[in-house]
Amino acid sequence: MRFSLVFLACAVLVACSPTAESPAAQAAPRAPGGFPMPDRPIAGIVAPEWSSGPDRDAADESGQLIRGLEIGPGMHVADIGAGSGYHTLRLSPAVGPTGVVYAEDIVEAYISGLRREAQRRGLQNVRIVVGTPDDPKLPAKAIDRAVLVHMYHEVENPYALLWNLASALKPGGRVGVIDLDRGPASHGMAPAMLKCEFEAVGYRQISSAPMAGGVGYLAIFEAPKVRPKPLDIKACKAG
């Protein structure tokens, strides 16, 4: 009888022990603000540009992006992770003098050179924005189109970034992502994981297709009509 009581007492202690698994202990880790952390690797930022200009020029990467997102005169476009400005400098003539291109990056040293180049070319419609890893710091409800080119796999907290980006998009605004169909550790993003993470924040995928010239795929999403609360967002599971 004494053995049974001791066994029962130990079982209760183990069940109540801080080391025992519980729903709280099993909960996915959350970043500041309540956003889930991604359940996949995050690539490091290695350079202000993805690859050499001539390769991308030959594939007409910017042209494919502009046509795919139907970017035209007068639009306000955000180049998220603009880096050295490869796309910013090509988006500027596409939106024209009545449009605006917000060249955003979290590394000010990268876009300081872009600022000088835009001034040298006399591009009056380029605005330089220094964001943070989880917030592009764009004006509210001002953006018709946003582009994230060969950089989404480097975003530390994609759910927070997409949530904050949504507040800058106009109703019906669209986001275009160019990436390579491979894992983040190899500086790419599987299209299915990209779709899952965008949809977790309320975006709707419009299309996803390989681009000509071997520069990756282009996925296009529509802005959320309603943003979920950060604590309601569930991280997508890596397959």
Image: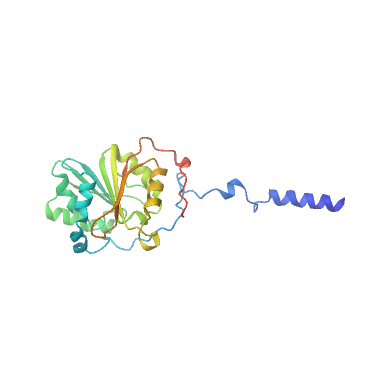
- Toward which corner of the image does residue 84 lie, by quadrant? bottom left
Return the residue found at the far right. Answer: 1
Question: Could you tell me residue 197's position as x and y percent?
Answer: 40, 47
Question: Which residue is found at the position 45% from the left and 43% from the top?
Answer: 233
User: Could you say where residue 94 lies in the image, as x and y percent from the top left?
Assistant: 16, 47
- Judged left or right of residue 1, residue 116 is left
Front position in the image: 100 or 185: 185
> Residue 28, how many percent across, how many down?
52, 49
State the residue at coordinates (17%, 44%). 95
Q: Is residue 139 visible in this depiction of the protein?
A: no
The answer to whether any part of residue 89 appears in the image is yes
Residue 89: where, in percent of width, then height?
18, 53
In the rendered image of this protein, does residue 227 appear above or below residue 88?
above
Q: Residue at x 37, y 59 (%)?
A: 182
- Marks counted in the figure total 0
Tell me which residue sits at (47%, 51%) in the image.
Answer: 237
The type of colouring in the image is rainbow
